[in-house]
Amino acid sequence: MNLEPYGVEKQPSPQGIPLHDLLNKDTLLPIIKQYANHLDTSSLAIAGSLFIKRYAVLVAASNLDYYGLQKERVDWWSTARLDVMSFTLQIEENPTSLFEDCWKTRIFAGHLTPMINVITKECKISSKILWENIAVRLHATLRKNEKSFALNELNENFNGLTCSETNWLGIEQNPFQTFLQRKEKWSEVPVRKTCCRYYQVNKKEEIPYCGNCPLR
């Protein structure tokens, strides 16, 4: 199991914040404000958007790769912790428990959907932006695995993420039907429908738009 490309690191004794604690606004908001300082912005909306865009790599992308594409079942997620300083997930070195339920339900209905609800309300930002931030990370995961998995396996996961059934999301409509786009080839990157607001951060003198930004 190698999830380091997604920022998921094995540690003898994982340190950081248990992921379920991040669904509490009193825990999550200080982290987003810290991220705002890192970005040199006073806008919680910008920080909230870019936080979930980065967090989606740690959570959504890593789970899609491990549980969706590789179809592995070792449960490294339950004891994962967020190291706020390095912004990585720390997991046990040798987890042995197996996870037999639907990984999408655990990650989305049980974690990302309630987190998006908190960020939307507290940071005053559209949930559409947040959902598309996650969608682009999912697409990137499928795209970078184009040569590692058969086309039908990529399509199977894409179809599962864009289906009309939404119990695994915990909401009535599936935002990925709108925001998880696919062109004729997986190597092609679709233009976003919303802007993640990365261009508004003040970290550098000139911040370019993302390559797939609709404002370019």
Image (cartoon, grey):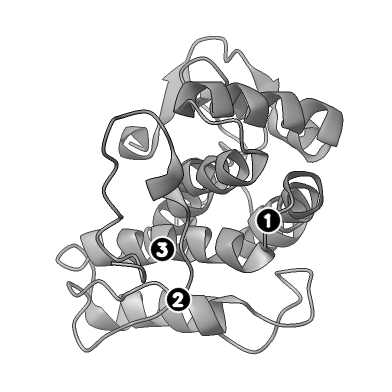
| Secondary element at tag 3 | helix
Which quadrant of the rendered structure holds the C terminus?
bottom left
Of helix, strand and loop, which one carries label 2?
loop
Q: Which residue is mark 3?
A: 136
Nearest to the observer: residue 55 or residue 18: 55
Q: Label 3: few (<14), some or many (≥20) within 10 Å?
A: many
Q: Give the number of the disc on residue 193.
A: 2
Percent x, y for residue 7?
40, 32
Q: Earlier in the sequence, mark 2 or mark 1?
A: 1
At x 73%, y 45%, the residue is 123
Residue 57 lies left or right of residue 147; in this view the side is right
Residue type pointed to by label 1? Ile
Q: Secondary structure at mark 1?
A: loop
What separation in Å lies between label 2 and label 1 (alpha carbons)? 15 Å
Is 150 on the left-hand or right-hand side of 167? left
User: Mark number for residue 73?
Assistant: none
Q: Is residue 19 above or below residue 14?
A: below
Q: Which residue is mark 1?
A: 125
Q: CA distance from mark 2 to mark 3?
A: 11 Å
Give the left or right position of residue 56, taking residue 82 as reference: left
Foreground residue among 85 and 144: 85
Three-letter code, disc 3:
Val
Is 43 placed above or below 67 here?
A: above
